[in-house]
Image: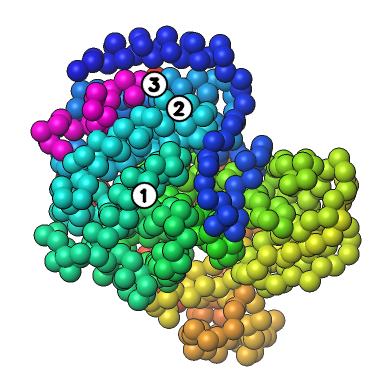
Amino acid sequence: MKNLRQLFNTGIIISFVLFISVQAKSQTNIKTNIDRDVLFPANSSSEIGGVLGGSINNCINNGVMARDYLLYIKPFAEKLDDGGGFMGEFWGKWYTSAALAYRYQPTAAHRMVLDRSASLLINTQDSDGRLSSYPKTQDFGHWDIWGRKYALLGLIAHYDQTGDKKSLKAACSATDALIGIAGPGKQKLTETGLQIIGSLSSCSILEPVVLVYERSGEKKYLDFALYLVQLWSEPNTYNPKGMRLVEEALTGTHPIHIAAPKGYEMMSCYEGLCELYRVTGDPKLLEAVVKFGKSVLKKEIMIVGSGSSGELWCDGANRQTEILEQPMETCVTVTWMKLCYQLLRLTGDPLWADQLEVSLYNSLLGAITPDGSWWAYFSPLTGERMPSPMQVPVCQSSCCVANGPRGLLLTPEWSVMKSDAGPVINLYSEGKWSQKLKSGNNLTISQETNYPETNEIIIHLDLPKPEHFTLSLRIPEWGKNTSLLVNDEPINCQPGAYAQVKREWKKGDRIRIEMDLRGRIIRAPGSLNHLAVMRGPVVLALDNRMVKDENYNLWLLPRGTQWNFKDELGGLNYVLPSPCITDDSPQQYVDLVPSPSKPENVWMAFEVPFLYRYTHFFDHKQVNLVMCDYASAGNQYSEKNLFRVWLPQPIFMNDVFPENTWRILYREGDTRPEIPCMFE
Ligand SMILES: [Zn+2]
């Protein structure tokens, strides 16, 4: 076995040679069946500004590119997962983030990191192609195949970004080695991995196997992928009924009852099915993933766009008002977003872009520390934020710290996409995007906006020659009163659909969108009596930096509430009780006024009207409380900075913020983790 230092030295020489020959230019060698995709990434340059752009830059500079990736290669070189660990996942998770960072910012420095790290990993590969962090005697150990999956995804990302055939060759031979031990007649992958999660981790290798087939064109990889999916339907020792991922999805089974309820690993298997659909065109596979995505959305996804409790599906949509143990693993947030991105590409249904936006602005940005260097493992809807513990000290990381950037750095990929008819704008944000149209014309789209803080979005188009095409603009499902103007001419648009504007576009064309950012009152799916407030895609939360504990009850005060009696001089003021809103009640709104002051690091804060009822007919009055965006709520990551999203009606202000919820975010007996300093 080569030691790490030898690998490192080889890497430096290879990197240097590559560095002098490399142009700082992102290429793409993805030869996918994009004709199955309705929307596809624009492969263009983009620069996202504003608060979101700042978070992306922090994530790249202080997170991904500040990491010592030698720590992730070491488990492969020295087989450190001897005994059942999952250190094998870190290299590929980090690498796929680094590849996204390079796509977004194709600098020579980022390219050097990609090239060097890939060649160092390849140097750990055995002569028979085996690429694992487990010793050979422990093939199929708990997370062996899972780690191999991430290594393959990393190598494929290197090939896609650079065209380096060595990486594709390494990925092919690693897959050959896997087929050698897990192909037909050999060990079934459905009976490997950690038994308690029912082989979902091993089976998620489907995704890179199909990607290797797409890139190599070698049928043996497609055959293996089809064989693996066939195994899912067969009874086995881990799952006596079989995993039945396709069958259960098609019948709309609650995700909690499919195979084993491990959210992240389960969704990873369906990501593989998306790739398999891309190469086979079998409509049943797409139907299964769409139905699965909709079941997850309906049954498990909470208001901030993530799910799980203790990493497992938990009937989360219904249970989200409770104080859950270890809610919303960041790995679940990221994998849900990646699945939504797949479904957006394959269906063109803006539902999935709406979900991406909600997850981005709430659960995902809520889980990254303000400097971008670290992530939360779990994110509650009530309580406090806690940084991820240093789960694997040897790799200076945790599963969620490694995964967070894969979600955030996906943003440029889905923000502005392409379709056969023309460009598609999914994300409204300060920034600039360029893409080459089919004609060869270069289109630049610039957005001037503070959205989602403010509601106006101005979009400027720039292209050398006028050209006919359809520009699609996502009108979010919640935006019932959205207005759209093209060169001051009103255009009809429907919420929950793309506004498709077909015309001859020319330099200087200007689009103005006014988003409907009225405060919406959201009823908890599982409790008539719990309400929350959303403003556009942003969920609002009470935060104890802005709300003093008071000893009274308050009721959220919807817009249009009638005072049954109001005496400006005396105390006889009252609002009579009304029933809880129900599923079929019309959408209620609440007036929001930007708060004149807010703590540092809080992005958005609004005064929200509540009703105080002293007694039956006397002294009812409006009291305003300040609520901020969920991602900013609790972002001091301290046990003193508490917040809550769901508001029982009435809410008892003396007991708004449960304390010490960090104890149910981590194991009993542990001390509260701190954000590690990554810059020493
Ligand atoms: Zn995780």
Badge 3 local density, few (<14 within 10 Å), some, or many (20+)? many
Depth order, front residue of 19/313: 19
Q: Name the residue type under label 2.
A: Lys
Side of 394 relative to 214 (left or right) = left
- Give the Cα distance between marks 2 and 1: 20 Å
Q: Number of callouts in the render?
A: 3
**Residue 174 seen in render:** yes
What is the x, y in percent for residue 16? 48, 10
Q: Which mark is residue 222?
A: 1
Q: Find disc 3 in the rendering and name its residue.
A: 119
Q: Quadrant of residue 72?
A: top left
Q: Earlier in the sequence, mark 2 or mark 1?
A: 2
For image coordinates 44% across by 63% down, the residue present is 282
Q: Find disc 2 in the rendering and name its residue.
A: 165
Q: Name the residue type under label 3.
A: Ser
For image coordinates 58% across by 65% down, the residue present is 349
Q: What secondary structure is the stretch in magenta mostly built from?
A: loop
Q: Name the residue type under label 1.
A: Leu
Q: Earlier in the sequence, mark 3 or mark 1?
A: 3
Mark 1: secondary structure = helix
Depth order, front residue of 198/468: 468
Q: Is residue 243 above or below residue 132?
A: below
Disc 2 CB within 8 Å of nearest ligand 1 atom:
no
Q: Quadrant of the N terminus?
A: top left
Depth order, front residue of 228/219: 219
What is the x, y in percent for residue 341? 51, 54
